[in-house]
Amino acid sequence: MSVKKEAAVAIKNIHKEFILPQSKNSTFKQTVVNIVKKNKKVTQKVLDGISFEIDKGDFFGIVGRNGSGKSTLLKLIAGVYTPTAGEIQINGGLTPFIELGVGFNPELSGRDNVYLNGALLGFNRKQMDSMYNEIVDFAELQPFMDQKLKNYSSGMQVRLAFSIAIKAKNEILIFDEVLAVGDEAFQRKCLDVFDDYKAIGQTVILVTHDMATVKKFCNRAALINEGKVTKIGNPIEVANEYSRLNQIAIDAQTGKKQQVSEESAKKPNIFLSLTKYGVKANSFAVNDIADLKITWDSDIVADRLLVDLYKKSGEQVSNFISSREGIKTLIGKNSVELQMTLNLAPGSYYYSLGLWTKDFKRKLTSVSPVGEFTVTKDYSRAPHEFAGTTLIEHKWKSS
Amino acid sequence: MKYLHSRNRAILREMVITDFKVRYQNSVLGYMWSLLKPLFLFAILYIVFTYIIPLGKGIDHYPVYLLTGIIFWNFFVESTMIGSSSIVARGDLIRKISIPRYLVVLSSSLSALINLSLSLVVVFIFALFNGIMPSFSWFLIIPIIVELFVFALGISFLLSAMYVKFRDITYIWEIFLQAGFYATPIIYPLMNISERYRGWLFMNPMAQIIQDARYVVATNTSITLWSTVHSIAIIAPFIIIALFAIGGGLYFKSRSKYFAEDI
């Protein structure tokens, strides 16, 4: 018997339609004209029957391409919009902000903005007084707090906003694209905070385009496409599906430009086989030699092959380019073999590949992500265990 | 529920403080202007209406009488004009956060109320200089201000919700206010109006409010609703205020859930 976890957010068959702006009556004249002409309202369906639950303690990712309706969904959860039909149940307090720095006023000092933003997040003056120093320290903006916000750089503003936002102590937190802004150091700080949230079992709803983050932090995710949930569950599958959707969109674009035949999208024209000492395999020991044989249709005249190798979290491990590494051209061939010594730490990996014309002018065909393999905790072929991603070739010298 | 309450209070407080701070940004005298404005207004009115157009002959303490009328009317104009555009003006908040929408309107009315209070300080100081003895009747100004505040707030709720969809509303309301300035006995004394029409003038809640305020602050010779109308019609201005307050509030409440997408 499995114990049902309590739902933090229950979304039940949500529909949302907007009246399109051109038919909106924003002046009396237009209203009168519309009444006389009996113009029908033009509506746009943004969400079309969405249902799912987010459990307490979930780190839930919502992904989707631009215009898929994910921001609308988030605003519905946050109570900013009212659904056209359906119901959303929220169980527990919800930090009601969608964006960082809501209500920031450029004419006020950094200090005043901290208090203003804090109030909007649900803190009174006393509570803000007690955590003001922590916020400023975290933002690393001590010398600037009495300056007007309009004199801050955009990075400084984001830092300040984020430092306040993470103080919010509600049961459910919503983050929309916080990682899209800020430099690398700031992003790392965000990720550290996410780590803490995960450790304490904080319920978080995260909207992002960064699949590596989804794979790393989320325990569940949903893909929204054209107003519907097209995939939900395992964040890695959801992220891969999202990447595939994007790839289709990119291929459609490049396809239009370069008139690659439609068939290439329909049926596979590139074939792979991963073997270990001649036997098909997708699980290897550390330092095993893997052979990847790639075969493609003879009507594809490719000059070079590019293979990208990633960790499952989305970080790239390495890449291999046939023309860079010995094979001058692939023209006249329709298969090639790549032999890799997998001096990789145990874990899951995947690879994608593409066939290109000379100088990477044109991508002929690609499959992404094409395959996964795992490296097991079998160090029998390695000199010893190691930490990190890989053991690079090295030598010690002592004098 | 209690938590919610204190949360909203914190938001309201910060919004009013922000309003106040932003208003006097970049001015050398800053907050002093809240006092200087009514002060100079008073000086101008005093010169114009005692030396150039002596409209107020025969009214005790006419300068104080006049100033009281002006600052009450100014509050009405300020709070309804700023209030009606408040929801659209804070669209950045409305679109991104689900704070109770009424807080936005309420905060703009409260800012105007603070200004009214500061102006009243000036009125009382001048009342003393003008030889009016301070009395307990001055405290009666409080229920009158409450009445005015409720009236202005009700109108602000109604107009701000309408303004989200019909941007013409502020222009229409401005014209209304222009007409209202003359329909209300602000610069002309009621004595100069024929008694037949006075009753009708008092159906305007602003007339009742301003004349009552003058009665308690400046002079008990001020003609009021109570001394003019002796029929059941005496409740008319209060009915009007109640209608605006309840109707405006309900209309606002029904529309507020669509503000985020309509702005």
Image (cartoon, coloured by chain):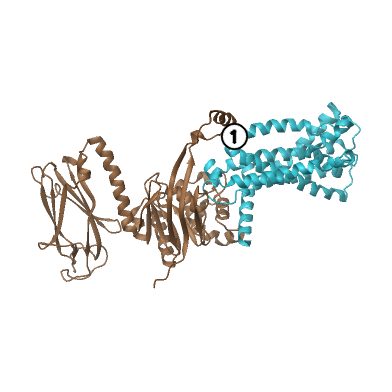
Chain colours: A brown, B cyan
Q: Quadrant of the C terminus of chain B?
A: top right
Image position of A241 (left or right of B72): left
Give the image location of residue B213, x and y in percent: 82, 43
Give the image location of residue A259, x and y in percent: 22, 36
Residue at the image point whose x is 60% and y is 43% from the top: B87
User: Is residue A320 at least partly visible in the picture?
Assistant: yes
Give the image location of residue A331, x and y in percent: 10, 42
* Residue type, label 1: Arg
For the image, the number of numbered tags is 1
Q: Quadrant of the N terminus of chain B?
A: bottom right
Image position of A26 (left or right of A183): right
Give the image location of residue A270, x and y in percent: 16, 48
Few, some or many C-alpha atoms within 10 Å of disc 1 (few <14, some 14-19, many ≥20)?
some
Residue A292 falls in which quadrant of the image?
A: bottom left
| Callout 1: SS | loop
Which of A128 and B233 lies nearest the eye of the viewer?
Answer: B233
Q: Report the residue marked by disc 1.
A: B167
Depicted A75 relative to depicted A126: above or below? above
Depicted A32 relative to depicted A152: above or below? above
Which of A283 and A187 lies nearest the eye of the viewer?
Answer: A283
Most extreme residue toward the top is B52
Most extreme residue toward the bottom is A1
Residue A214 falls in which quadrant of the image?
A: bottom left
Most extreme residue toward the left is A332
User: Is residue A148 at least partly visible in the picture?
Assistant: no
Residue at the image point whose x is 82% and y is 45% from the top: B124
Image position of A368 (left or right of A134): left
Q: Chain of mark 1?
A: B
